[in-house]
Image (cartoon, rainbow, N blue to C red):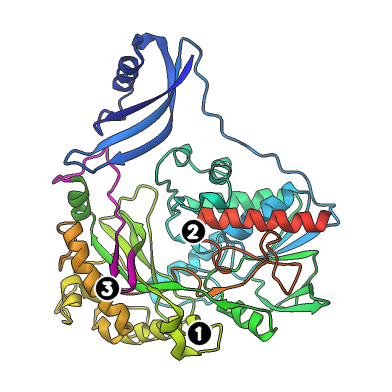
């Protein structure tokens, strides 16, 4: 017999096999020896009270042989001889999963990536962090795996209506992720492990007959009769296919310019902008778990905060327990920060984006009738931050209470941001309404989380690439561009996703629609 059992246990008990079986037996009314095994269906932390608990839903095997968890594994056909081809622009989550879906449909994908493969990309990131020298085509945003590869690997999404989340997670496991992502409430792979998974996906695509082209920046589309006939790359390459899937990410500003120049419709999209804030992880643990020491059985604590300040939403974004603040810039004169965590989340700091929603009326000064005004607004703030930091990607920063009091900090606490920080007035960098909204929200957050509002926390500018400020429209159902019938915008760059899983699902969706149009 099999049955599902929910257990609420103390953290140290929840990882003790003997105690788990005793608890299952008690709940099920059977002897412990009748239980042949179990596996976890769901797992989460309940820290609402003074004592945190681990809540687990278990699939239990009673009086029958135990069988391991079934992980769905897909077989991909050989498409090397397929006459149908799709050009996939971008090798981030949307592009990679679009390529896999094309293969599943019997279509050959040609993946064009402006950056380098993941191993070479890592070397460029080392130079960026140590020397402050950026490669505009190979950085935290551009290269194999996209921005997601080196930005933590969080797999939690609320976009459950956009596709099959479990399918995406199972595919991640098929390509090397640990099975705990299938049942943890907030699944996470870790920046140290994601590159191996990305590499295996590429190897799968190539082994099935798909092709990858690195350091091939798309610079033009050849259009005739409302269809893209070919795609041109900066090195003079010309690629032809039956459809083009545009999965270029939220920082590919040159693509937005290209679309505008070709008179292909784009539109402003609301986004968010602010700062990244870092606390000692031990402080966040003590606040969330109500204890002086977290111990080894609880994960590093996270938080999710939101506050309405007048008409503006202020909220935490991409919270990284045990994480590091990283450079997310794509140009030498712009300063952008993001956060990531290794799989163990064992760094001494906790960081999170803290951002303010930006609507069209706030960016009107950057081009009332220009669809790219949100992008220009982003750039202006990033350029101010770069100048204030003094170059080499040193980041302007303030202690949290000093930020609220409009006081330049006399010193700054230790920070995980490798290029270093410089004491500055962030009021001179951030738009006035963003600065004021953050000041009020920090005080409110301190009331929600006692101890959060502290001068031991450091505020670092700027967190500006939370999502694309541009939406590339597409037809409902068909998912192609309304003007260009074989152009399929997708993922974060097109304004339809907000993370690894949602981007992967969107990539699959557009590939499925492109496949239907090609194969009909």
Contact between marks 2 and 1 (CB within 8 A): the answer is: no
Of all residues, the one furthest to the front in this rendering is: 311
From what the image shows, is residue 422 above or below residue 321?
below
Q: Is residue 237 left or right of residue 267?
A: right
Confirm whether residue 499 shows in the render.
yes
Secondary structure mostly seen in magenta is: loop
Residue 291: say if magenta: yes
Q: Earlier in the sequence, mark 3 or mark 1?
A: 1
Res 438 label: 3
Q: Residues within 10 Å of mark 3 (few under 14, many from 20)?
A: many
Per the image, label 2 sits on a secondary structure element best described as loop
Q: Which residue is mark 2?
A: 499
Q: Can you give x and y, in whole percent of width and height, for residue 307 in the image?
A: 28, 65
Res. 424 image quadrant: bottom left
Q: Earlier in the sequence, mark 2 or mark 1?
A: 1
Q: Can you give x and y, in whole percent of width and height, for residue 261 in the image?
A: 66, 86
The structure residue drawn at horizontal position 48% and vertical position 85%, both measured from the top left corner, is 376
Taking depth in this image into account, of 116 and 253 the one nearest to the observer is 253
Res 33 label: none
Range shown magenta: 290-315
User: What's the CA distance linking mark 2 and mark 1?
Assistant: 23 Å
Contact between marks 3 and 1 (CB within 8 A): the answer is: no
Q: Is residue 179 left or right of residue 439?
A: right
């Amino acid at each position: 017999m099999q049955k599902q059992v929910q257990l609420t246990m103390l953290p140290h008990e929840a990882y003790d096999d003997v105690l788990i079986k005793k608890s299952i037996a008690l709940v099920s009314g059977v002897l412990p020896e009748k239980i042949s095994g179990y596996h976890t269906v769901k797992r989460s932390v309940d820290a609402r009270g003074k004592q945190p608990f681990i809540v687990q839903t278990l699939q239990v095997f009673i009086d029958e042989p135990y069988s391991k968890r079934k992980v769905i594994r897909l077989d991909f056909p050989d498409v090397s001889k397929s006459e149908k081809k799709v050009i996939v622009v971008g090798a981030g989550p949307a592009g990679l999963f679009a390529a896999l879906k094309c293969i599943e449909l019997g279509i050959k994908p040609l993946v064009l990536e402006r950056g380098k493969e993941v191993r070479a990309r890592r070397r460029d990131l080392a130079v960026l962090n140590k020397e402050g020298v950026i490669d505009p085509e190979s950085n935290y945003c551009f290269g194999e795996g996209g921005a997601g590869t080196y930005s933590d690997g969080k797999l939690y999404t609320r976009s459950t209506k956009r596709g099959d989340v479990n399918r995406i997670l199972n595919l991640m496991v098929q390509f090397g992720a640990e099975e705990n992502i299938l049942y943890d409430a907030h699944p996470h792979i870790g920046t140290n492990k994601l590159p191996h998974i990305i590499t295996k996906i590429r190897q799968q695509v190539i082994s099935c007959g798909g092709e990858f082209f690195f350091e091939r920046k798309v610079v033009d589309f050849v259009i005739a009769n409302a269809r893209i006939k070919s795609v041109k790359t900066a090195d003079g390459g010309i690629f032809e296919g039956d459809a083009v899937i545009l999965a270029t990410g939220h920082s590919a500003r040159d693509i937005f310019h290209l679309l505008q120049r070709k008179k292909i419709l784009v539109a402003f999209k609301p986004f968010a902008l602010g700062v990244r804030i870092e606390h000692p992880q031990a402080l966040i643990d003590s606040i969330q778990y109500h204890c002086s020491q977290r111990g080894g059985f609880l994960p590093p604590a996270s938080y999710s905060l939101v506050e309405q300040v007048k008409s503006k939403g202020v909220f935490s974004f991409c919270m990284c327990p045990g994480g590091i603040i990283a450079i997310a810039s794509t140009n030498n004169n712009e300063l952008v920060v993001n956060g990531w965590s290794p799989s163990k989340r064992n760094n001494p700091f906790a960081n999170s984006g803290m951002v303010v929603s930006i609507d069209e009326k706030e960016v009107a000064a950057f081009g009332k009738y220009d669809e790219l005004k949100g992008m220009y607004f982003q750039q202006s703030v990033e350029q101010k931050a770069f100048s204030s930091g003094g170059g080499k990607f040193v980041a302007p920063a303030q202690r949290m209470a000093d930020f609220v009091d409009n006081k330049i900090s006399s010193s700054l606490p230790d920070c995980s941001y490798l290029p270093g920080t410089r004491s500055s007035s962030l009021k001179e960098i951030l738009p006035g309404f963003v600065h004021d909204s953050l000041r009020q929200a920090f005080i409110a957050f301190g009331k929600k989380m006692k101890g959060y509002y502290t001068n031991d926390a450091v505020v670092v500018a700027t967190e500006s690439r939370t999502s694309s400020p541009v939406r590339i429209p597409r037809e409902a159902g068909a998912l192609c561009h309304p003007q260009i019938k074989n152009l399929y915008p997708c993922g974060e760059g097109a304004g339809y996703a907000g993370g690894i899983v949602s981007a992967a699902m969107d990539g699959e969706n557009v590939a499925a629609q492109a496949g239907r149009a090609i194969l009909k």
